[in-house]
Image: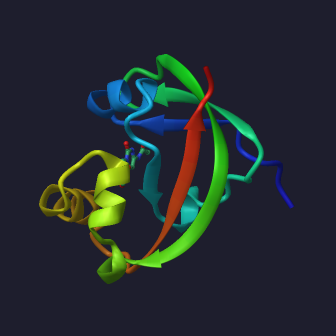
Amino acid sequence: MSAAPTKITFFEWLTPLVASGKKTITIRDESESHYVPGTRVDVHTLEKDEYVCQIDIVSVEKISFEDINEEHAAQEFIPLEELKPLIREIYPNDEDFYVITYTLVA
Ligand SMILES: CC(=O)Nc1ccn([C@@H]2O[C@H](CO)[C@@H](O)[C@H]2O)c(=O)n1
């Protein structure tokens, strides 16, 4: 068993949405599903590994690609018609994903 991860990366262009509290979920594949509710993690940019802010993990829930809906898009702060192609671009071969819900640490 490995320890709960203490860091998560986001694409740099999305980090203002995370740091402002507008974006409250992220959808990741199995390899990034091991975040533990109740733990605090540091947000860094993927490209430059720059520290952005901290978030508290609220929940990690499995979801199929086809079940990603408008509610998720609202929580992602990305239109659904952009979100689904984006997820497909990042993860071309997956059907099973994990919705990671978090709150911004003030
Ligand atoms: C290693 C790494 O950083 N990967 C990812 C993967 C996903 N995402 C974002 O999560 C949401 C659902 O996929 C969308 O908003 C994506 O753009 C991200 O920012 N960074």
Splitting the image into 4 quarters, where does residue 27 fall? bottom left
Q: Nearer the viewer, residue 30 or 53?
A: 53
Q: Residue at x 57, y 45 (%)?
A: 102
> What colouring style does the render use?
rainbow
Q: Nearer the viewer, residue 10 or 61?
A: 61
Q: Residue at x 34, y 35 (%)?
A: 11
Q: Is residue 11 left or right of residue 62?
A: left
Q: Is residue 17 left or right of residue 105?
A: left
Q: Residue 20 at what x, y percent from top left?
A: 41, 24
Q: Residue at x 22, y 65 (%)?
A: 84
Residue found farthest to the left: 81
Rendered position, 22 above or below 92: above
Q: How many marks?
A: 0
Q: Residue 90 at what x, y percent from top left?
A: 29, 57
Q: Residue 3 at what x, y percent from top left?
A: 83, 48
Rendered position, 74 above or below 70: above
Splitting the image into 4 quarters, where does residue 95 fall? bottom left
Q: Which quadrant: the N terminus?
A: bottom right
Q: Residue at x 38, y 51 (%)?
A: 75
Q: Residue 73 at what x, y percent from top left?
A: 29, 57
Residue found farthest to the right: 1
Q: Which quadrant: the C terminus?
A: top right
Q: Nearer the viewer, residue 100 or 46?
A: 100
